[in-house]
Amino acid sequence: MSKAAGKLKSLKKTVERVTHTSKLKTNIPAGMAAAGPPLGPMLGQRAINIAAFCKDFNAKTAEMKEGVPLPCRISVNSDRSYDLAIHHPPATFFLKQAAGIQRGTMTPGKEVAGMITLKHLYEIAAIKIQDPPNVLLTMQQMCEMLISIARTCGIKVVREIDPAAYGEFLEERKLIVEQQRRELQEKREAKMLRTG
């Protein structure tokens, strides 16, 4: 064996193996992590102890309102341990909560599902800017991003809202949403009859 081959062999021994971690991004409702689908199979594929993860997640989110969707980033280490990073709820959740609506519009830009004030927008931006992906954004950039998200949800950003008029608007909106649901249900039933 030549000197170069001997050096190469000794060099291979000294270099440590690089272990790549498996990353998982998912939304989990606060306090409601369960071993069933869809969370259980995702964790099982990465050889994470599902029961321990669910217990850990539910303990960390115990003080939060149950059912709030939380974006989670899970890094799986080679020894089957994991690092769990829990972010604030999605911007759409905050925007819909501030507007007092359950769902956004089906046709963004054509109909308004709800309204929020600039104050609401600023408060949401102050919360969302704390998330690691948004740390490098300025407050203005964060607000602009939230305005565009609100627009896609059909939420109009205004300076002031008259509570009485907005209450009437929401009542009218409930009727429209109910009618849209009925139309969707009829379309589904008609499609089922055609394929059946």
Image (tube, rainbow, N blue to C red):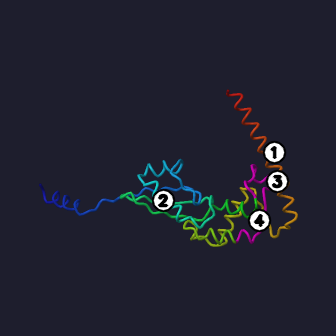
Indicate which disc, 4 or 1, sits on the residue closer to the N terminus.
4
Which numbered tag is attached to residue 173? Answer: 3
Numbered disc in front, either 4 or 2: 2
Q: Any magenta on residue 31? A: no
Numbered disc in front, either 3 or 4: 3
Q: Give the quadrant of the N terminus.
A: bottom left
**Position of residue 25 in the picture relative to residue 69 (left or right):** left
Quarter occupied by residue 193: top right
Residue shown at the point (78%, 42%) measured from the top left: 182
Kind of residue at disc 2? Ile
Q: Residues within 10 Å of mark 4 (few under 14, many from 20)?
A: many
Q: CA distance from mark 3 to mark 1?
A: 10 Å
Q: Residues within 10 Å of mark 1 (few under 14, many from 20)?
A: few
Residue 85 is situated, as x and y percent measured from the top left of the image, at: 51, 64
| Secondary structure type for disc 3 | helix
| Secondary structure type for disc 4 | strand
Identify the residue under disc 1: 179
Indicate which disc, 4 or 2, sits on the residue closer to the N terminus.
2
Kind of residue at disc 1? Gln
Which numbered tag is attached to residue 116? Answer: 4
Q: Report the front residue among 187 and 16.
A: 187
Q: Which residues are magenta?
A: 101-122
| Secondary structure type for disc 1 | helix
Which numbered tag is attached to residue 74? Answer: 2
